[in-house]
Image (spheres, rainbow, N blue to C red):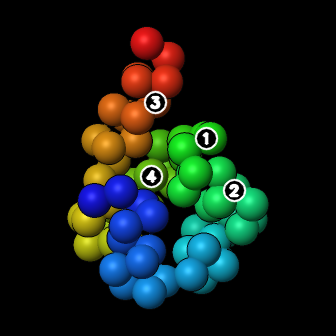
């Protein structure tokens, strides 16, 4: 599941997720909008927070698509 869809499905705000991860709301916004990918440790933490719904593999695929 993409991050935006997970946030909407769970009614989690970007502010709440940012607080859980120790990053700024602007950083979460860039992830949601596809402008930036999280570092691997942040992606792993998001996977844990989301119960596996937002998988690390999705970030890797998105990053590869932007590069390639």
Pointer 1: what residue?
36
Sequence-wise, the earlier of marks 4 and 1 is 1
Labelled pair 4, 2 in contact (Cβ < 8 Å): no
Q: Do the residues labelled 1 and 2 touch (CB within 8 Å)?
A: yes
Name the residue beneath numbered marker 2: 27
* SS for dot 4: helix
Image height of 57 relative to 25, above or below: above
Point out the tag, 1 or 2, that comes first from the N-terminus.
Answer: 2
Q: Quadrant of residue 4?
A: bottom left
Q: Nearer the viewer, mark 3 or mark 4?
A: 3
Q: How far apart are marks 3 and 2 (CA)?
A: 16 Å
Quarter placement of the N terminus: bottom left
Nearer the observer, disc 4 or disc 1? 1
Q: Judge from the rendering whether residue 56 lies leftward or rightward of residue 28; answer left or right.
A: left
11 in relation to 40, above or below = below
Of callouts 3 and 4, the N-terminal one: 4
Kindly report the distance in space between the C-alpha atoms of the residues bearing marks 3 and 4. 12 Å
Q: Name the residue under label 3.
A: 63
Res. 46 in view: no
Task: From the image, tell me which residue sits under label 4.
Answer: 43
**Which disc is residue 50 wearing?**
none
> What residue is drawn where x is 36% and y is 70%?
6
| Label 3 with label 4: CB-CB less than 8 Å | no
């Amino acid at each position: 599941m993409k991050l935006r869809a997970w946030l909407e499905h769970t009614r989690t705000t970007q502010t709440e997720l940012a607080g859980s991860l120790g990053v700024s709301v602007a950083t979460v916004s860039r992830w949601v909008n596809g402008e930036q990918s999280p570092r691997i440790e942040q992606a792993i933490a998001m996977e844990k927070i989301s119960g596996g719904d937002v998988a690390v593999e999705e970030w890797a695929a998105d990053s590869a698509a932007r590069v390639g």
